[in-house]
Amino acid sequence: MSTADPLGGIRRIGVVLAGLVAVLPLLVAGCAAPSASPANARPAVPVTPSESAMITGPGAGSATGPGPRTAVGPGAKPAGQALPTGVPEPPAGSDQLVTVLVPATTSGAGTLRAWQRAPGGGWTSALGPVRVRVGTAGVGSASEGVNRTPRGTFTLDQAFGRQPNPGTALPYRKVGDSDWWVSDVKSPAYNTFRSCAPGSCGFNESAGENLGQAGPSYDYAMVIGYNTGPVRVGAGSAFFVHVDAGVPSAGCVEVPRASVLALLRWLTPAQHPRITIGLG
């Protein structure tokens, strides 16, 4: 014969309640567990191969060494890195520089990079490295009739194209079938831009370039300031940084279309941009 325990039922209810209290936090955590990524995180944006070649911002690394250094200390300005070996330092005020370096003077291809002068000195990478083509005769002393890209440092302060201005701050000329670059060594207009209807020009049109009829190479282009002041007759003419349309270069720097557009939108006249073409 057993004796009833009037508190037994109460004790059993207490055990059950204690179990629920222990399990409840786990149930709540499972329902409200944070996502693997923050709720305000932006989805990753796919990067195209052409865009992956463009390195922008002070945190970008370098193809020739570590990324830009950062100045240390209160109020210190960020410092950049040195330019590639053999590239001369542009004068004060020229704060944007494009470099086109080839491994040998006979090379028909090289690497383009763009550099921004850092506030604390040195340079940061703004674009590149980008594989480009130069003249089929390489880089060096240029002359009319030789497919060689001139070696040296030149201005990069005007642009043109068959297409409308893509957003560059450089002086930009939209060209058509009446626009020319004169390569006639007998003309006073040698190595300058001229506008005249075909068949009416005062120079040998067959010795020049009709910019509007040149095809997609001249959809977008920047003028390399070689042999411009003063102009030396026969020293070479019509040197540009332009779109690579798959045509061998007669001396221009041929650059993938996306990178030409990136350069045009980056270059600023107030920073007196220059281009250095050489070995490296």
Image (tube, rainbow, N blue to C red):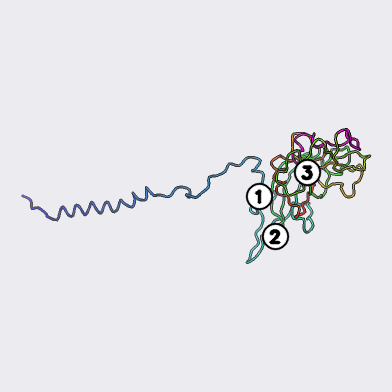
Q: Is residue 129 visible?
A: no
- The tag on residue 37 is none
* Extent of the magenta region: 198-220
* Residue at x 71% of width, y 39% of height: 257
Circle 3 Cα neighbour tier, 10 Å, few/some/many (<14 / 14–19 / ≥20): some
Q: Is residue 233 above or below residue 12?
A: above
**Residue 234 location (% of width, % of height):** 91, 42
Callout 2 amino acid: Pro
Q: Which residue is mark 2?
A: 119
Answer yes or no: do the residues labelled 2 and 1 have beta carbons within 8 Å? Answer: no
**Residue 22 location (% of width, % of height):** 29, 53
What is the spatial separation of the Cα atoms under label 2 and label 1, in whole angstroms? 16 Å
Q: Residue 217 in magenta?
A: yes
* Residue at x 81% of width, y 46% of height: 224
Left or right of residue 87: residue 232:
right
* Pointer 3 or 1: first along the chain: 1
Q: Is residue 188 above or below residue 19?
A: above
Callout 1 amino acid: Thr
Secondary structure of residue under mark 1: loop
Q: Residue 259 in magenta?
A: no
Callout 3 amino acid: Arg
* Residue at x 72% of width, y 60% of height: 121
Q: Which residue is mark 3?
A: 173
**Residue 28 location (% of width, % of height):** 35, 50
* Residue at the extreme left: 1
Q: Which residue is mark 1?
A: 56
What is the spatial separation of the Cα atoms under label 3 and label 1, in whole angstroms? 27 Å
